[in-house]
Amino acid sequence: MHSFSICCYIFSRADVCSVKLLQDGLKLFLEASRMSLNLRKCLVMFGNTSNISIDQISSSLNMQIGVLPVRYLGIPLVSRRLLAMDCRCLTLKLVDKIQAWTSRCLSYAGRLQLIQATLSGILNFWITNTVLPKATLMESEKIMRGFLWSGSANKRRAKVSWARVCAHKDEGGLGLRRAVDCNKAAMMRLVWDILMDRSSLWVRWCKAEILKGCTLWRMEPKQAHSVTWKNILSLIAQVAANLVYSVGINSSWSLWHDPWFQNCPLISRLGSRVIYDSGLSRDATVSEVISDSAWNWPIHVEQLREISIACAEIPIGQHDSISWQSRGQPFSFKSAWESIRASYPGVPWAKIVWSKGAIPRHAFYLWISFHKAHLTKDKLQNIGLIQCSLCSFGCGQQESMNHLFFECPFTKSVWSKVLEFNICPFPTTCSWESTASWALGRTKGRQFHRWMRRVGLAAAVYHCWRERNSRIFRHVATSPSQVVDRIAFDVAKKAALCWNIHDTPTNRDVVEYWGIDESIFITDRLLLGSREYGFCS
């Protein structure tokens, strides 16, 4: 037995007699089709109707009264441009999701996971189906930013700028995407659909009512154009930069206006005068400069000589085709987003923070540390939030990033024990700068003992910061040995999930110091040549 649903809109006059006829007709249809009506999902909407008529009709239909504009899958269907007030339900939905999570005391890593898995998914559904107002996009980002840093939708001081948070992980970010960039990438898909003449009602309507036989590259923004079309036309140059044209013998590309040559229209490169000098028409196609499967440019036009020489390297195929970024590749949302997003230089510590098997909440705090974004007391004193910036561990020194990680006698003793567990000599200086340099030089690699150094560093940063906060906000203090025990517990628990570890003297010493079960070592000689190391799911 098959089940399916149909969503439809039925219009009627706002009087009881008309509604009665509508009900009778609908009843006949349901009997003939053997379908049923789900009244819980049905809405009746009114326009310019008296309250008396509304009450009579709604009670007759036994349906809930809906509110305009009409929505389909949550997205408002309006003939005008979407306003921020039309999209208010989107931001409210994001806030509702966050409020349902606030009681769970989520860590930074947990909030990041929920943003990636849920909040971004809700926003992307809207973005890929309609052009959202910029105010709505910014408000959505504000809500997610507040949730990441404070656990609620309320605005709060961020430790790292949202632009940097939305960079790639290897660029020092968290891998999120800016809503504005995603909106542009979605509109670039619309341009691609028009260029590829996709079989859709929207494309056919655009070609018939807006383009009217004109190519997309010859369109100019007009006052009468919708906001969507104005946004589409503003992205034409960015779309052209990603296109790869393949020229056929009977090419129908516009010679002067299509960006078939080096992603730029010839009229934009050479100006309009060259059209007159060449003797070709303004509507000439590329096929008019092809003869016997070879290029045949007007040689008397000096401006076209360089074009003719460059075209000698462009092969002439059998048919015209357009690809995205490389020959034969279709459009992809990810590659479009990559082409327009703000990029940053790569950071050398990304693989240290986000290495395979890292403990998420520890990795997040290590990421904050590499950005030097912890709100230490010296920073809070500089902005006037506190009067005293003395270290919470009672050493009498000013608390700063370098002092806390790991110049303070308390944290230094913790860090020295972690280094001892990882068979590493204790450095002469223990500032954060020297620790970061040590990490860049001594923790990279696939070997198990180097992975343990990365995990140990992240755990030390996390638990030292947690102990510092416990002393400030809860007035609960523990000894360095207790902090080391917490670090050892977390690291050993994670390391116990490892498998395929080579039984070397260094690895065996590390396992013994951390108190890890020796079952992680390889026992089958057939596996000795395999790559070290793996993790159980």
Image (cartoon, grey):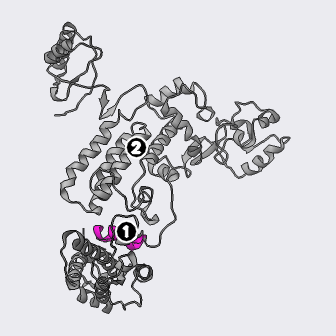
- Identity of the amino acid at label 2? Leu
- Tell me if residue 369 is in the magenta stretch: yes
| Badge 1: residue crowd in 10 Å (few <14, some 14–19, many ≥20) | few
Query: Which of the 4 image quarters holds residue 61?
Result: top left
Give the labeled residue for mark 1.
381
Picture coordinates of residue 95, whole percent (x, y)? 27, 45
| Badge 2: residue crowd in 10 Å (few <14, some 14–19, many ≥20) | many
- Identity of the amino acid at label 1? Gln
Q: Is residue 78 above or below residue 173?
A: above
Q: Looking at the rendering, in which quadrant would you find the C terminus?
A: bottom left
Outermost residue to the front: 387
Q: Is residue 53 above or below residue 206?
A: above
In the picture, the disc for residue 137 is: 2
What distance separates the C-alpha of mark 1 from that of mark 2?
34 Å
Picture coordinates of residue 171, whole percent (x, y)? 46, 64
Does residue 19 appear to the left or right of 404 in the view shown? Answer: left
SS class of the residue under badge 2? helix
Residue drawn at (36%, 46%), measured in percent from left and top?
A: 140
Q: Is residue 355 visible?
A: no
Residue drawn at (49%, 46%), measured in percent from left and top?
A: 331
Q: Magenta residues?
A: 350-370
Picture coordinates of residue 21, whole percent (x, y)? 20, 9
SS class of the residue under badge 1? helix
Does residue 279 appear to the left or right of 459 in the view shown? Answer: right
